[in-house]
Image: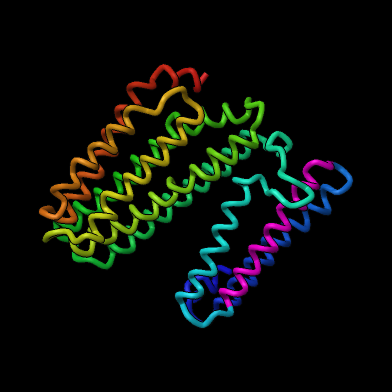
Amino acid sequence: MSSTLFSSFALRGLTFVISLIIVQLGRHTFMLMALARHNRDNFVNFVRITVWAVVESGFWIAGGIAGQVGTRMALWGAAIAILNLAPAVRFWLPGLGASDTRTWDVEGHHFSERCGLFIIIALGESILVTGAAFGQTDWGAPAIAAFASAFVSTLAMWWLYFDVGAERAARRLAADADPGRMARLAYTYFHMPIVAGIIVTAASDEMALAHPLGRAGTAEIICLLGGPALYLFGNLIFKRTNSRYFPLSHLVGLGLLALTLPFAWQLSPLILSLAATGALIIVAIWEMRSLKDTRASLRE
């Protein structure tokens, strides 16, 4: 699947989706065999999951066969929509109904650790992309400043997720009476904008490195400001699931990015990158100082 990923919209689309389906249905088949005599509730849950995966697979295969890129994108988009709709409706099926999230066997600390490692991988990949782009540019002052901004923004994103929010959410998940519900909301849907924000920010860093000076275009502005905004928004709603309030620091960070937008077309990609990184640093320092008591209690 990895070897065909970059040519999945060209000649190897069908090979890509067959590999994907083998992984998906192979995992579900194993779980059905493992749970059949040991956990009736979760066995029925995986029956539901498998049926949804079979329906989803039809769209993946149809997209892999389709010759037009637009048709392939539409069919694969439908498959992704089914994939994300299924947990929201609790894998409802005619006759079986919807599953009860309280029967989803979620081990809080392990589950949150897996998701945290996924965030680390995404941040690490963004550093690799930025480093590769930096290695192909002239090492003048603007490029060095853009690279420094990109690296510091990655550190700030790491800090914003792992300083307090990750551990607090892990403990809340482990103690929750309905961990399946929280796992579906906080660690499935709410992690999507977090990862998307990392990806868009990495793309914007590459843009700033390639053309640090001159006025930024619309695509560059969307990425340079939208990536950090998406990341802050994802963390905002993720942290709200394990706190009584939306974090004010994140709301202020989003406000700072919004205030930059009216002037963005007059600024260079480098200045926009520095401004976005500055907003992330302000949010990180604010949260670090405002939650010092929470941090101390989590370290005990």
Q: Is residue 53 above or below residue 41?
A: below
Q: Is residue 118 above or below residue 156?
A: below
The percent position of residue 133, horizontal first and vertical second, equals 30, 63
Using residue 220 as the reference point, say whether residue 75 is left or right of it: right
Residue at position x 52%, y 45% in the image? 189
Residue at position x 38%, y 36% in the image? 159
Residue at position x 59%, y 41% in the image? 184
- Magenta span contains residue 59: yes
Range shown magenta:
39-64
Query: Which of 77 and 21 lies nearest the eye of the viewer?
Result: 77
Q: Is residue 269 above or below residue 256?
A: below
Q: Residue furthest front?
A: 94
Q: Is residue 154 above or below residue 213?
A: above
Q: Residue furthest right?
A: 37
Using residue 230 as the reference point, say whether residue 274 is left or right of it: left
Using residue 43 as the reference point, say whether residue 138 is left or right of it: left
Position of the N terminus by quadrant: bottom right
Query: Which of 103 and 203 lies nearest the eye of the viewer?
Result: 103
Please tell me whether the stretch drawn in magenta is mainly helix, strand or loop.
helix
Residue at position x 48%, y 70% in the image? 73
